[in-house]
Amino acid sequence: MKKQTQAIRIQAKRSHNREHSVPLYLTSSFTFEDSEQGRAIFAEEIPGNIYSRYQNPNVDEFVEKMCMLENAEAGLAFSTGMAAIFSSIAGLLKQGDHVVASSALFGSAIQILTKITAKWGIECTFVEGHDLQAWKAAIKDNTKFFFCESPSNPGLDLIDLAELAALKEGKDIILAVDNCFATPILQTPLDLGADLVIHSATKYIDGQGRVLGGVVCGKEKYITEIRFFARHTGPSLSPFNAWVLSKSLELLDLRMQKHAENALALAEALEGHPAIKTVKYPFLKSHPQYELAKKQMKYGGGILTLDIHGGFAKVQKLSQLLHIVSISPNLGDTRTILTHPASTTHSKISPEDRAAVGITDGLVRVAVGLEAIEDLKADFLNALNQL
């Protein structure tokens, strides 16, 4: 059965009411037939729901769909994408362990690795993501975790995931890939050798900017360890948000095709405009890793970046001249969104570190939505022509 069909047809077990659409299980806890059943479920001798902090039918359905899409053995859902990242690191690592991470990461992920886990004696070395020799050179005897984004946020740098996975062969290293920008529709990192795939489900998985959520999928032995951490620390996904996210997955394939189609068309229309230094998009031939993008991804995704001449002053003017584009720190919405990373999502990172990953004062991230492409082109060109 094709994945698109499974994304629509996988559902929680139908109740005695014979509902067609899965109901909401808005309950904090579940009942037992008797004390013996309660004991057996708590002892994990038999399966069963206990408490919605541990599991819930709506959450289970969402996780099952995500594991199917990512070709994963197991998965776990969280209240946010950052909860998923933090729980994966905290649940798998201990004092004295070492992480190697791409320097091109979402701002909050960098804060976790430099300000939070560092207090617990977990060391992190950052490397340029595309430089596989740098990854190899950074490996120590106590290296336990590789972490990267591909494409990266916001610079759209790619990492050859199969080659990166090869570096951990024969070593006790877990490779975790943030697959938020690509989604499982564009690439499945587990098939390329990754051990874990992490998503902020708030973005494309939801697709309409409604709810928060996160998910980790991957090898069962690692998910089991993360589940222990999450069960006792409580970063659980609400049943309502899980219900929304599960329904959203029914259209993920169709949405990602259109996001990518619009993004490529907009990137091609804006490339070469005199108000722009550079346009970056994985499936533009001018992208430095175009060949890798074509090999590793099904489509180029829904994100492009523009480096505007004149820095923040011109970005500010652009944001005022656009009429149908939202100004927001989010992405993955049906509505096109413009973000200035240096002053928002990556503002807590030093100017030197931002510059090292290509985040200039003139860089804007454009999360291209599902509007008519003719309207998007006209809006951007009208605004850019006035800068």
Image (cartoon, rainbow, N blue to C red):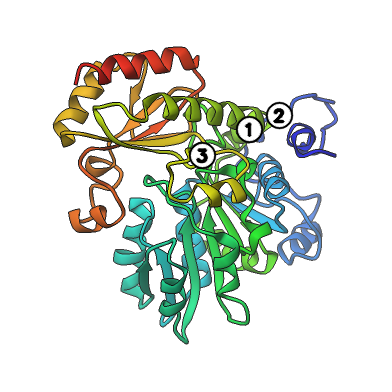
Secondary element type, mark 3? loop
Marks 3 and 1 sit apart, C-alpha to C-alpha, by 20 Å
Image coordinates of residue 149 in percent, x first then y, are: 47, 54
Image coordinates of residue 353 in percent, x first then y, are: 24, 58
Image disc number at residue 252: 1
Residue with the mark numbered 2: 23
Q: Are marks 2 and 3 in contact (CB under 8 Å)?
A: no
**Image-based side of 22 in relation to 385, left or right:** right
Q: Are marks 2 and 1 in contact (CB under 8 Å)?
A: no
Marks 2 and 3 sit apart, C-alpha to C-alpha, by 40 Å
Say which of 341 and 208 sits in front: 341
| Crowding near the residue tagged with mark 3, few <14, some 14–19, many ≥20 C-alpha atoms within 10 Å | many
Quarter of the figure with the C terminus: top left
Residue with the mark numbered 3: 283
Which residue is drawn at the image coordinates 81% and 38% (left, top)? 2
Marks 2 and 1 sit apart, C-alpha to C-alpha, by 21 Å
The mark that comes first in sequence, 2 or 1, is 2
Residue positioned most to the bottom: 141
The mark that comes first in sequence, 2 or 3, is 2
Image coordinates of residue 104 in percent, x first then y, are: 37, 56
Which amino acid type is shown beneath numbered disc 1? Leu
Which residue is drawn at the image coordinates 68% and 52% (left, top)? 50
Of badges 2 and 3, nearer the viewer stands 3
Which amino acid type is shown beneath numbered disc 2? Pro
Q: Reply above or below: 308 against 359.
A: above
Say which of 305 and 371 sits in front: 305
Query: Residue 3: which quarter of the image?
Result: top right
Of badges 2 and 1, nearer the viewer stands 1
Which amino acid type is shown beneath numbered disc 3? Phe
| Crowding near the residue tagged with mark 2, few <14, some 14–19, many ≥20 C-alpha atoms within 10 Å | some
Image coordinates of residue 1 in percent, x first then y, are: 85, 39
